Amino acid sequence: MNETSQNGKDRELLTIRHMRKAFGDNQVLKDISLSVRNGEIVSVIGPSGSGKSTLLRCATMLETMDGGSLGYSGVWACEAADGQCGDSVYAPPAQLQKIHRSFGLVFQNFNLFPHYSVLKNVMDAPVRVLRQNREQARQEALRLLEQFGLADKADAYPCELSGGQQQRVSVARALALKPEILFLDEPTSA
C-alpha cells in the first residue's frame, strides 16, 4: 500500500458497478461502471434525456437500481445478486441511513423549503439528521452563508432570492452536512 492510500487521499469514495435502470421498456442506464476517489472531480456530460439525472438519482438512492452494485467508501448500499450485473439487493435500512450521511445532493431545481428562511434551510438538516446542537448548526450555517456571499440574506425566503442565490443556498445546505461527496445536478443551470 502506498502512502497516499494509507492517509486516505487516494481512497475510493464511490463505486458503481454495472448499474442498470429502466422505466418500463425504456432502458435508461445500461451497464454503467465508475469509481470516484477522494479529491477527484467527475463530470457526466450528455444531451437532455440521456440519463444523467437518473444516474445521480440512483447513486443517491432516490431511485432504486434494477441491477448492479453501489458502494460508498467500501460499504455497499446495494450489490448485484450474482456479484456482477444481476438484480440489485439493497443493504438493511440502518446501513443505508449511515451511507446517506456520506453524500450531499444539490437538485437542479434546488428544492429549498419555501416556508423556511435561508438560515433555516441551511441549518435544518444538521439539526434533524445529525442531531447537531441548534446554536452550533446556526453558527455553521451563518459561516457557510458568509462564504457564499449570502450573509445578508439569512432572514430572506427563497422567493426573495435570484436563481443564482437560491442555487448557492442549496449548495450551502448540502455542505452543512459535511458530506464526503457532493452531487450536483445541472450545477450551472441558474
Image (cartoon, grey):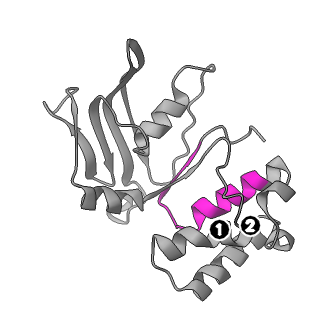
Q: Where is residue 19 in the image (x, y as percent from the top left)?
A: 34, 29
**Mark 2: few/some/many CA within 10 Å (<14, 14-19, 20+):** many
**Residue kind at label 1, given as amino acid type:** Val
The answer to whether residue 67 of the structure is visible from this angle is yes
Which of the pair 3/176 is nearer the observer? 176
**Residue kind at label 2, given as amino acid type:** Val
- In the image, is residue 133 above or below residue 50? below
Marks 1 and 2 in Cβ contact (< 8 Å): yes
Q: Quadrant of residue 18?
A: top left
Residue matched to label 1: 122
Q: Give the range drawn in magenta.
A: 166-184
Q: Where is residue 189 in the image (x, y as percent from the top left)?
A: 74, 37
For the residues labelled 1 and 2, the Cα–Cα distance comes to 6 Å
Q: Position of 177 compared to 86: left or right?
A: right
* Residue located at (26% from left, 56% from top): 93
Q: Where is residue 29 in the image (x, y as percent from the top left)?
A: 41, 22
**Mark 1: few/some/many CA within 10 Å (<14, 14-19, 20+):** many
* Residue located at (67% from left, 74% from top): 141
Q: Per the image, is 182 magenta?
A: yes
Residue matched to label 2: 118
**Quarter placement of the N terminus:** bottom left
* Residue located at (64% from left, 50% from top): 111
The answer to whether residue 1 of the structure is visible from this angle is no
Q: Position of 87 compared to 127: left or right?
A: left
Q: Which residue lies furthest to the top in this view?
A: 25
